[in-house]
Structures are given as C-alpha cells and as structure tokens.
Amino acid sequence: MTALIAGSRRGAAPFDVLRLHFSQRALLLRTPPGIMLVVFALTVIIAIIFWRAGSVPGSAEWVQNSRNNAAVFWALPGFLGWLGVQTVSLTFPLALSLGCTRRSFVAGTVITHVALSLYVTAMLLVLLAIELATGHWFFDIYMTDVTILGSGNPFQLALTTFLSTLFVLSIGGAFAAAWVRFGALGPTALGVVLVLALGIVAILLVPLASAFQPWWLVVASTTMIVMSIVGQYVLLRRASVR
C-alpha cells in the first residue's frame, strides 16, 4: 500500500495494484493450503472407511474408484470465486482514492489473478510430486493423481489447474465489476446473459458432441477469461466510486 500511496502523484502502476491486493497475503497465500489440508484429511478418512469395509488398497478397483475422487478440483472454486469478487468490489474504491487509474487497476488485478493461479498450480504440482514419490501417501491414497487432473500427468494438471483457477477468479471479478457499475441489478443481468449464452452455445454444439476434443475446453475457458477481463474494464471504466 505504501508504494501505491507514493505513486499516487504520478499514477499508480499495475504492479502497485498487485502490492495492494497482496497486502492481504495471509488470506491469499494461507487459505488454499488450508483447504487442501482439509481435503487431504477427508480423503484419508474416506480411504480408511473403504479399507475397513473390505476394499483392498492398490487393487484395480481401488485405484479406479480413488482416481474418480475430484474433491481437490472442486474444493477451491468457492473461495476463489469469492476472492475474485473481493479483489474488485472492495479494492477498486481504495485503489482509485490512492491515485490509481481504472486501466491500471484492471491490469493490476489481472496480474494478481495470474499470480494466484500460478501459486495454486505450483502448490498442486508439489502435492502431486510428493504423492507419487511416497507411493500415494504410503497407503494408496489418491488426492492429486486423479482423472480430472490428468491421472498423474503433471502437464495436464498444471494446465487444468491454472486455467480453471484463472477462470473462476476472472468470472468473479466480472460479476464484481457489474455490481460496482450497476448495483445489485448488474450481477443479476450478467448472470441471465451468461446462462442464455451458454444455453445457446450448448444447443449449437450438441450435434458435435461425438467429436468432442479436450482442447475445446482450453479454447472455451481461455475465451471466457479474455471476455471477463474485457468486461471488467468496460464496466469499471464508467463506474462511480462508492
């Protein structure tokens, strides 16, 4: 924040906005590992329950069922979505009061979201490396070596984690920008438009379902991320500071 205040005379740069966001580094950096710790504890408990029920650790059935565990993928979006909203709705008025331009704020927020996405990706890659090195936590426990993250493929895990994290943060930021610009009506209208657009796209793509390729998801998520970032700037460009 000191850097942002010092730079208010010349106009704060995007990296000053990054520093402003990371003034809450305890929240940003400690919460994801905390959530992963809870996921790991629950995964261990469930594995022990199945073991006590007669399942054999390491068997083909055990591995298949364990790799269908998507808890690590679905545990973070709630927090990340809230964080995406907070980084825009709560920080925008403060940043502008300290001399930040709207363009610099959006650019700094995007850099923050990218940094957080890289952080979450690095965290899961470290967990995957430990999981594989220990023979799945010494008890055939599958947390990151799961199907939705590439079944132990670090490249696929990294790509999936980075894009999905940045996607949720960007969508959260877009909804927050709609709220800042139009009040409660903004997120509601944006939600309706988003649902209708996704519905139309789904109807158009139904005939192509049999030809589905995983890279379509990469293109779709990247497109949504870019649209969300553009939407943040368009909405915040004329938003009043409250």
Image: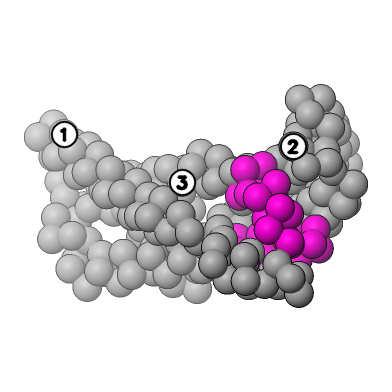
Applied colour scheme: one colour
Q: Is residue 83 visible?
A: yes
Region rendered in magenta: 87-113
Q: Residue 13 in the image: x percent, y percent?
A: 70, 72
Q: Is residue 106 left or right of residue 172?
A: right
Q: Which mark is residue 76?
A: 3
Name the mark nearer the viewer: 2 or 1: 2
| Few, some or many residues within 10 Å of mark 1 (<14, 14–19, 20+) | few
Q: Is residue 162 visible?
A: no
SS class of the residue under badge 1? helix
Name the mark nearer the viewer: 2 or 3: 2
**Disc 2 versus disc 3: distance between alpha carbons?**
30 Å
**Do residues under tags 2 and 3 come within 8 Å of each other at their CB atoms?**
no
Q: Amino acid at mark 3?
A: Leu
Q: Relative to residue 137, is residue 201 depicted above or below?
A: above
SS class of the residue under badge 3? loop
Q: Looking at the image, tell me whether mark 2 or mark 1 is earlier in sequence order.
A: 1
Taking the magenta stretch, the answer to whether it contains residue 123 is no
The foreground one among 21 and 43 is 21
Is the stretch drawn in magenta largely helix, strand or loop? Answer: helix
Q: Amino acid at mark 1?
A: Ile
